Image (cartoon, rainbow, N blue to C red):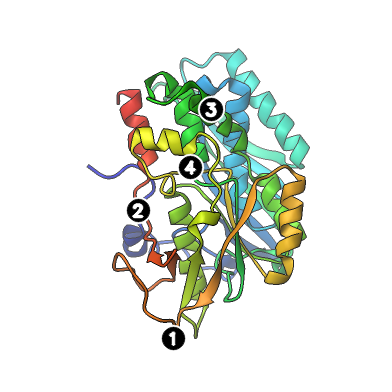
Amino acid sequence: MSELGKIDRTFFERRVAPNLGARRDDVSIGPQHGVDFGVLDIDGRALVTATDPLSILPALGLERAARFALDLILADVAVSGVPPSHLSICFTLPESMRDEEFATIWETIHAECEALGVSVVTGHTARYSDPSYPWVGAATAMGVGDHDDIVRPDGARVGDRLLLTTGPGVESVGLLSTLFGDQLAVSEDALENARERLEDVHCVRDALSAAAAGPVTAMHDVTEGGLAGALNEMADGAQRASAERDVRFEIDGAAVPMRPGVAEVCDALEIDPWHATSCGSLVIAVDPAGVDAVREALEARGTVVAEIGGVVDESGLDEIEETGTGDEGGSVFVDGTRLEHPHVDPSWAAYAELAGE
């Protein structure tokens, strides 16, 4: 049986990347494994776009579930530094969803879109016999801006500093503790702290605030594969963009923030918080001159942010302890040991086991 979650890089490179329909000159950034968005050139302007599944978990409460789903969709455009401005959304609703329930979801999405300046331009809504929660559709977010303002996914450069907002594992822990708290062997205090992590699962405004404070060279939300995946994907992108240097991300493990409740729940589930999806967390590569400004902008929003390391030229560095084989991409080292991409996010299996699937 195939692994749950996104297809792996090998399959993408062999079967998807060579088969992307017609080649067009107006595609500035096309599909790449681990890249959050694409860019079209429209008469000199940049149209940033990204598509994601739409996930609604009624057990969170419909309003909170709707805000959670929308932030996940808009985040992949926001990490480009261009504010999301338009939304195309498709709902494939289960038969069990009542009109009043869908109205709550839709009105919540409307209110949040209105607050962010996002207009819904088209969509599709219908009930079908097969769909089931949480996957009830998909949506495409768009934003229009200047090409020069785009924070490229492969833009991290040697000398940049690396910031992390919020920390690893918050999304997985917040969801699993809220949905299945009675099955977790943790203290009541740890469970309460873990459930509060759902309040951390919002990063659209953080991404836009960081990009505006700049200079930000690259930004990635910490979703499938967790912090380990995000760091490796950013390092790979930086390596592809570098013609002459071997790029390494050097991370200070002690500097990585760990929010209350995360370690306890991950220990109880026997999952690595660095490998688990953490929507709401951002890895941000920043020119050293902009580190203080970006940190201040995020802290002014009440967001936890820490400087966790930097980008270095690997050429000529002394040999240090290394695990795994790596590949042709950039490398990530934590306290001198290589951090590999986990490839499989453990939160999927944890969810399936707790749900009895």
- To which residue does mark 1 refer? 316
Instruction: Calculate the distance from the C-alpha at mark 3 to the C-alpha at mark 4.
Output: 12 Å
Position above or below: 47 against 160: above
Coordinates of residue 290 in the picture (x, y in percent): 73, 66
**Left/right of residue 297 with respect to residue 165 in the rendered view:** right
**First-in-chain label (3 vs 4):** 4
Tell me which amino acid carries mark 1: Gly
Foreground mark, 4 or 2, reads 4
Whichever of callouts 4 and 2 sits on the residue coming sooner in the sequence is: 4
Q: Which residue corresponds to the image point at 46% horizontal and 37% vertical from the top-left? A: 172
Please identify, in this view, whether the residue under mark 3 or under mark 2 is nearer the observer.
3
Residue tagged by mark 3? Answer: 195
For the point 58% across and 74% down, the residue is 157
Residue 18, label in figure: none
Res 180 → quadrant:
top left
Label 3 amino acid?
A: Arg
Badge 3 crowding class, 10 Å Cα cut-off, few under 14, some 14 to 19, many 20 or more, is many
Question: Mark 1 falls on what kind of element?
Answer: loop
The secondary structure type at the circle numbered 3 is helix
In the image, taking residue 47 as reference, residue 270 lies left or right, namely left
Report the amino acid beneath label 4: Gly
Residue underneath mark 4: 169
Residue 192: image location, x then y, percent: 54, 24
Q: Is residue 32 above or below residue 197?
A: below
Secondary-structure class at tag 4: loop
Q: Look at the image and tell me in which quarter the C terminus lies.
A: top left
Mark 3 or mark 2: whose residue is earlier in sequence:
3
Measure how far apart labels 1 and 4 are at the Cα level. Answer: 34 Å
Q: Left or right: where does residue 60 sit relative to residue 85?
A: left
Asked whether the residues under the numbered discs 4 and 2 touch, taking CB atoms below 8 Å apart as contact, a structural biologist would say no
